[in-house]
Amino acid sequence: MSGHIGKTKESILEAAVELFTSKGFKGTTIRDIAGRAKVNPANISYYYHGKQGLLEACLISFFEPYLSLLEEEKRKIDWEDPEICLHRAIRKVLVFQSEQHLLSRLVWREITIDSQVAREIIASYLMQERYYFKALTSAAMGGKSPSLPVSMLIIQLKGMLTAPFLNSQYISEVWGMHPKESYFIEKYYESIIEWLQTALHVQKNALYIARPPAPVIRTV
Amino acid sequence: MSGHIGKTKESILEAAVELFTSKGFKGTTIRDIAGRAKVNPANISYYYHGKQGLLEACLISFFEPYLSLLEEEKRKIDWEDPEICLHRAIRKVLVFQSEQHLLSRLVWREITIDSQVAREIIASYLMQERYYFKALTSAAMGGKSPSLPVSMLIIQLKGMLTAPFLNSQYISEVWGMHPKESYFIEKYYESIIEWLQTALHVQKNALYIARPPAPVIRTV
Amino acid sequence: MSGHIGKTKESILEAAVELFTSKGFKGTTIRDIAGRAKVNPANISYYYHGKQGLLEACLISFFEPYLSLLEEEKRKIDWEDPEICLHRAIRKVLVFQSEQHLLSRLVWREITIDSQVAREIIASYLMQERYYFKALTSAAMGGKSPSLPVSMLIIQLKGMLTAPFLNSQYISEVWGMHPKESYFIEKYYESIIEWLQTALHVQKNALYIARPPAPVIRTV
Amino acid sequence: MSGHIGKTKESILEAAVELFTSKGFKGTTIRDIAGRAKVNPANISYYYHGKQGLLEACLISFFEPYLSLLEEEKRKIDWEDPEICLHRAIRKVLVFQSEQHLLSRLVWREITIDSQVAREIIASYLMQERYYFKALTSAAMGGKSPSLPVSMLIIQLKGMLTAPFLNSQYISEVWGMHPKESYFIEKYYESIIEWLQTALHVQKNALYIARPPAPVIRTV
DNA sequence: GATGAATGAGCGTTCATTCAT
DNA sequence: AATGAATGAACGCTCATTCAT
């Protein structure tokens, strides 16, 4: 089969992204992957040092361009308006995830599993991401003290950025929307920016007036 | 072993939640579970009709109180301020997830896998959730037209509500915060309400002035 | 299959001895063993922790009685004629190997492979064997200084004791004799004792007279 | 890689001897061999018709000079003292095995495995060896009737000749001696000759006097 | 002569599950 | 109610070998 120029390696990676995404890493067998990629199962070990190595290749193929993207915007904050840089970074992240929506879902889900697999790789990438987000956000705030710690602001931003891709089938099944479509990205970008404006600039107590006190609740 | 009266069934479920959460459903073996619960593996099939049945029991033990909680607040919107009901629902959801943080992580992750397992159960629960959120949000908005469709607002809210629990180890490892602690819940609740105020009440164009036009970006 | 009282474990060991002996450890598959023992392959991992554990069980089932035997004779040298004890030990070793000729062939061959498998087990047993042989031989020699170092004498004895079992199919194919038959054991025992008499008692130079000087030879 | 003129074929054989010896035929992969020989794995099939053919080449490279050596001494018994020829043959065999100690270990071990591999080759070589040993021994005995059948005498001699090489790592690990060193060969040669003198010349009953009757023993 | 991509068979092992007790 | 022996399917992976280049 195949035999032609080395598209075997590529087709394995493509098939792996699709299957890991939909069935999970553990739920996917290398025979599934080989079958979809129409190659011999042994090639997976040959090219990627086994199933685990294939997952790592998936993670790398996501994080490398993802972090490049953040790095690029971080570099610009010295001579451009930092807030614009942050906005552009947000937009780029959305677009990138939209284009790589399968890979995005795979990555953001898989890192919620406490696996020794690829733990160091992931940890390293997440630390870089943290650095870039901190730099961008701090610069965008200027010297102002935010109503909440920066860390929590970033956690929230991260949640907003990844949620629609992580839960993409929830969104399409339940709400009939498609996170990979440009209309969704457009609207979603707007709403994130809207939230960001408030979070970055509004004085802490300004909006608190109308809000009722948070009730003490026991649910269980 | 065990010997006492029917603690077997309960201890199986506890062990399953812990292990499914940390290692994933597919990554957990029934011998893992039986080992942690100090029970014979055959009892799992006996009590829960196999591993799948055990997962379903986990899902049910999450969704039943979760939906009860939403249903309760939805009922109140007829004689209480709907916005307060929505705020209280949000708070209750956060507290509930905090108390059941392992189970929450398990549920929100597992539904991102396209598994035939428990598909109908999950779909049914999510439709109920959708109904309650729609009712609460619509009521809270009164008659005002929001700057974004309600569906997107809810998608965003859902993302904010689940993200910290789904990514709890990310938050603790990278940011040193713990989503199950009351301080986090408190601050996080505040920031969600802050966002909600803006999203519900602010006129669409009010905040758009300062924002630069979204650049058209190709990343790949 | 089987289902009856636990003869599964035993039949696995029997089949393993036969097949490891004739085809070698690496050349035997667990499906071979399971097939011959008429049990399910999974039982091998279940009872013996895998193929390697099965080999270890084989080694142990050889060395334990083998060393008990040596230990028994070693204990007797304090109140019996040590030379008789040594003779009896030799005889017992031959009879034991004859009765366990498959296992003997397996063990003595397998320890010639530099495998990390069961290396510690084997090393420990061989050290015990060394101790018993040294004690028996030294006692049998009384105070006399042998024509050769004791170590070499034991090495030679060991070689004589194991050779016919290690090369049993060579002996039967090439010479038509069967090392497991009592006639062979009888004759072989006699010849070893004959050699031992000379080695232990004869003065070093007594027999050297007739011997021509060893020529210096280069073969390659 | 390699690049030089046909050293490829030779280096494969060298690597094969080393690895087959230490890890066993089945325990060695052709990639191991190719790796050590710094050669492409495909060359092994190219030059030796596969792994089996490589083993056969090893066997041949041992037996050809080995049998030449025996044949040479056998030819000399017509005009030299046959006993001297036998002694010289023994010495040459020891020296040859010492020089080819890896190959010797490999060969003598591998023929204890009932493999269809190279069965005919080995059988043929062993029959030749048998012929030469019989001729040499019979001639050395003159017309005297030995205390034991010639066949048994040769079996014993064979055992003594091969044992130290077959168990070379046992000897070095347990006894700290090295069968490939000339000191060992020297001493070992002497002790074999000593034994041979007795076995060939001593009257059957001469040494039997002091020996106690062999006890009847059941070990299992 | 030498390479590296590719293959198919089969390896040891793990797994959820069943069933007699 | 609870156990442990036993099963069959399928897992990830390694292997010797082939073949176009």
Image (tube, coloured by chain):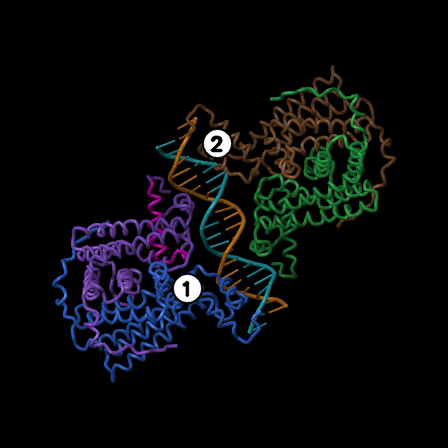
Chain colours: A purple, B blue, C green, D brown, E orange, F cyan
Per the rendered image, the range of residues in magenta is A6-27
Left or right: residue C66 versus residue B8 is right
Residue D125 picture location, percent across and down: 64, 28
Q: Which mark is residue B21?
A: 1
Dividing the picture into quadrants, the one containing residue B98 is bottom left
Q: Nearer the viewer, residue A164 or C206?
A: C206
Determine whether B164 is above or below C17 in the image. below
Q: What residue is at 38 percent from the left and 75 percent from the top?
A: B64
Label 2: how many residues lie within 10 Å, few (<14), some (14-19) or many (20+)? Answer: many
**Residue B107: in sight, yes or no?**
yes
Q: Is residue C22 magenta?
A: no
Circle 1 SS class: helix
Q: Residue furthest top?
A: D79
Q: Are marks 1 and 2 on the same chain?
A: no
- Residue D37 numbered tag: 2
- Is residue A8 inside the magenta stretch? yes
Q: Amino acid at mark 2?
A: Ala
Badge 1: chain ID: B
User: What kind of element bears circle 2?
Assistant: helix
Quarter containing the C terminus of chain A: bottom left
Q: Amino acid at mark 1?
A: Thr
**What is the x, y in percent for residue A175?**
26, 67
Front-lying residue, F9 or A41: A41
Q: Residues within 10 Å of mark 1 (few under 14, many from 20)?
A: many
What number is the disc on residue B115? none
Label 2: chain? D
Classify the position of the N terminus of chain A by image quarter: top left
Mostly what secondary structure, the magenta segment?
Answer: helix
In the displayed structure, does residue B201 sit left or right of residue A113?
A: left
Residue found 60% across the figure and 56% down from its top? C47
Name the residue at 44% across, 65% down. Answer: B18
**x, y percentage for residue D109?**
63, 36
